[in-house]
Image (cartoon, helix red, strand yellow):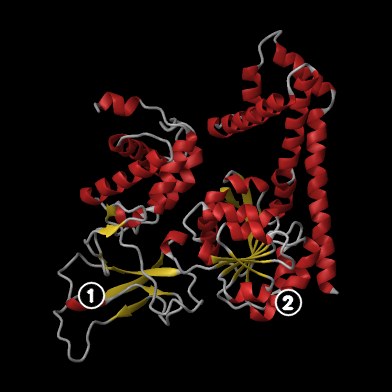
Amino acid sequence: MDDANIKKQNWDVKETELFLEILKELDMKKCLDGRKVRNNTLFKVAHRRMTAAGYHRSVDQLKFRWKLLKSAYYKCKREPDSPTPIKIQGWWRYEQTMIAIMESRHPLVGAGVKAERSDDMSKDSDGESSMLPWAQPCPDSGAHNNSTIHNLDLIVGLPPRRPCSLCHSVTPVKRMCSVPSPVDMTLGLSGVNPEPCPRISVQFVPIKMDPEMDSQLKIGFIGAGNMAFGITKGILSGNVLPINIKVSAPSSRNLGRFQELGIAVTHSNVEVVCSSDVVFVAVKPHLVPLVLNEISQYITERHIIVSVAAGVTLATLEELLPENSVAIRLMPNLPCVVQEGALLFARGSRAKQEDGALLCSLLHRCGLVEEGPEAWIDIHTGLSGSGVAFVYLFAEALAEGAVKMGMPSALAHSIASQTVLGAGRLLRDSGKHPAQLRSEVCTPGGTTIYGLHTLEQGGIRASTMSAVESATERARELGRRSAARSRK
């Protein structure tokens, strides 16, 4: 393919986001280190994954897109306040992902020595040969204190010299192993006479967790309702295996659909906690205190407790949980079932940034995952949790209007659902304000402006805003009630 054809291909938002997500998953900080063999292999893997997702790009097109994205990243870094537009349309959508990819590489990469760095070919998760040296679990990974993998990087503070034999004896370790924080090591052991080498600063660099990187990560759900099922479906669409998930519920009414996915089920909440690292508490808000009281004595520092109960605050969760427990409050919505959810979470006082990164990595197949202050969670409940039902009501009304005018009901509902889907995707992918897209549909004296006038006369704007407000206030009320019950 010639240069002109490589450059003229247009990329939409969804395609670029998928491309960056693939690169992120392939551990960019190890692969994009300036070695063409590694880069070529990486882009071949990305090409195959993009093709499998329905985006047919050549390897050269992927490389050119990556070149443009890198140029935009460096321009923003050099000139953050520059009025000159970025060449990448909708750059703001990709900026955080690019920062995560580019800044995960140590600034001294190329000037240091990578411990246990091997040039042997290994198999990619998709079966294609690649140069991806994933960190491996400790031999005692059966214990459940292992929630984060660390890679031992030896960063040399002096110009590179020929490394001594001891430098290559260091192996990756896990957090559960007793390893001191960054220290200076003086190289010298009895019986070993390595060549003299400079003092080396040992730095433990956490790798962003992905289920693909830790096959031992265990996930549990207390509660088997629609929200738990939606999150589970999203998680399974990633790299998590059904064997690593367990679900509990007091009755068998909802457990059958989990069993159909190959997931183990039980009636014991304690069993779920004891066999999991990440525990989703997906029960009704008024049941949260009862559930946490039941399982609290089995919760350890290795656990991450994620509550999806509407209105239950982090303060309430931390009050009910043992001291030093890691709590995260998450509000998903039902479209997680089809990997198009909108999820917002807030970390508790003892939850670290790595815990949030782990949750993002776990849920990224569920849809859009964002972190924010807890004050936004109740608003998100009204906007997106309840907002799904508001959209369904509008879609139903659209279809019923068509039925009134003579269209068959089945066809009307099919077209209405596709209209909502298409409008939503265009709104998301274009990056435009809804008002701008709405005005683009309207033509002077046309059908759309007449229809919009009728909707405005009916107060659709004010009614919708009031609906979000009412749902938000209800979520806050549930939070106050839950806090009051927990104090009794």
Q: Kindly identify the amino acid type of the residue bearing the numbered disc 2.
A: Glu
How many C-alpha atoms fall within 10 Å of the one at disc 2: few (<14), some, or many (≥20)? few
* Callout in the foreground (1, 2): 2
- Residue at 50% x, 67% y is 217
Compared with 91, 37 (above or below) is: below
In the image, taking residue 399 as reference, residue 155 lies left or right, namely left
Quarter of the rendering occupied by the C terminus: bottom right
Q: Nearer the viewer, residue 87 or 294?
A: 294
Determine which residue is flagged by label 2. Answer: 294
Q: Secondary structure at mark 1?
A: helix
Q: Kindly identify the amino acid type of the residue bearing the numbered disc 1.
A: Cys
- x%, y% of residue 382? 75, 46
- x%, y% of residue 200? 27, 74
Q: Nearer the viewer, residue 77 or 73?
A: 73
Determine which residue is flagged by label 1. Answer: 167
How many C-alpha atoms fall within 10 Å of the one at disc 1: few (<14), some, or many (≥20)? some
Quarter of the rendering occupied by the N terminus: top left
Of the two numbered discs 1 and 2 on the same chain, state the one appearing first in sequence.
Answer: 1
**In whole angstroms, how far apart are the C-alphas of marks 1 and 2?**
49 Å
